[in-house]
Image (cartoon, rainbow, N blue to C red):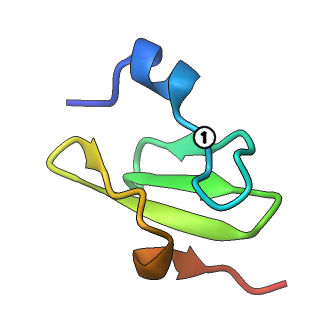
Amino acid sequence: MALSEDLLQILVCPACKGDLIYDREAARLTCPKCKLRYRIEDDIPVMLIDEAEKLQG
């Protein structure tokens, strides 16, 4: 099951409040501004900055 469109419209990056990019196949939400990637477990986004993956570049 994927995240609902309603939920995706209100979710923002907890670090910068920027928009997120949803990767359905990888089950991740990515903030291109701060280069953080948040995982999704059992259709629940884990929006904890300390647990986010830091992207290179």
- Position of 12 relative to 10 (above/below): below
Q: Residue sitting at 63 percent across and 69 percent down? A: 36
As rendered, which of 15 and 29 lies closer to the eye? 15
Q: Residue furthest top?
A: 6
Rendered location of residue 40, percent (x, y): 31, 54
Q: Residue sitting at 33 percent across and 29 percent down? A: 3
Tell me the SS state at disc 1.
loop
Rendered location of residue 13, percent (x, y): 62, 50
Asked which quadrant contains residue 21, the reply is top right
Rendered location of residue 34, percent (x, y): 77, 67
Q: Residue sitting at 60 percent across and 40 percent down? A: 12
Q: Quadrant of the C terminus?
A: bottom right
Q: What's under tag 1, amino acid-wise? A: Val
Badge 1: few (under 14), some or many (20 or more) residues near its Cα, within 10 Å? some
- Count the marks: 1
Asked which quadrant contains residue 2, the reply is top left
| 22 lies left or right of 45 | right
Q: Return the residue at label 1.
A: 12
Q: Quadrant of the N terminus?
A: top left
Rendered location of residue 6, percent (x, y): 43, 13
